[in-house]
Image: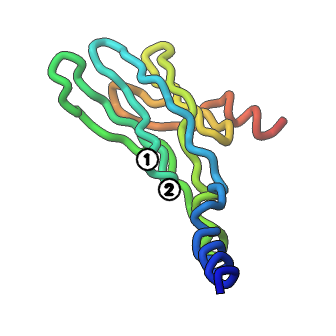
Amino acid sequence: MTRSIVILFTVVLMPQLAPAKRAAPAKVEPVIHEGIRYVAPNDDGRRGYIEAWDIQTNRKLWELTIFGNRIDPRLEEDVQWIFIKALGVQNGMLIVTSERGKTYEVDLKTKAVRESQLSQEQSTA
């Protein structure tokens, strides 16, 4: 009887003890440019997005999706998630790099997003 209880508890608790299939996304350091802090929350693997915050008032100014990520319903969802891994500013453009190595440029004046030439060159190499 005791053996049956131990086996039952093992079977019930085993899924909760199994490690996650996807590691947590990397913490992305915020970037500050001209009084605005740009952050990548990395809380939604279905889309990579950034937020702009006023550093004096700590008020969110806007949010912008950089890339979307289609999820195949036939596969496990969490292993398909893609997150932002790095932010930077160069020549007035916010540079956003995904875990998959794609780089995007965001025009901070117009909020236009485009895939960087660097990213496109890497995909053809």
Give the answer, above or below, for where 82 lies relative to 125.
below
* Gap in angstroms between the C-alphas marked 1 and 2: 9 Å
| CB atoms of marks 1 and 2 within 8 Å | no
- In the rendering, at what x and y percent does residue 7 appear? 68, 78
Decide if residue 25 is on the left or right side of residue 112: right
Decide if residue 23 is on the left or right side of residue 54: right
Please tell me which residue lies in front, 93 or 88.
88
- In the rendering, at what x and y percent does residue 25 appear? 56, 41
- In the rendering, at what x and y percent does residue 60 appear? 22, 33
Decide if residue 35 is on the left or right side of residue 72: left
The image quarter containing residue 41 is top left
Decide if residue 49 is on the left or right side of residue 35: right
Please tell me which residue lies in front, 69 or 107.
69
Which is closer to the viewer, label 1 or label 2? Answer: 1
Look at the numbered disc 1 and give the secondary structure of its residue.
loop
| Residue for badge 2 | 46
Asked whether residue 21 appears in the rendered view, the answer is yes
Give the answer, above or below, for where 21 lies relative to 40.
below
Residue at x 37%, y 26% (from the top left corner): 38
The image quarter containing residue 4 is bottom right
Q: Type of residue at label 2?
A: Arg
Residue at x 80%, y 39% (from the top left corner): 124
In which quadrant of the rendered image does the N terminus lie? bottom right
Q: Residues within 10 Å of mark 1 (few under 14, many from 20)?
A: few
Asked whether residue 104 appears in the rendered view, the answer is no
- In the rendering, at what x and y percent does residue 74 appear? 65, 76
Residue at x 64%, y 68% (from the top left corner): 14
Q: Type of residue at label 1?
A: Asp
| Residue for badge 1 | 43
Residue at x 76%, y 40% (from the top left corner): 123
Please tell me which residue lies in front, 50 or 25.
25
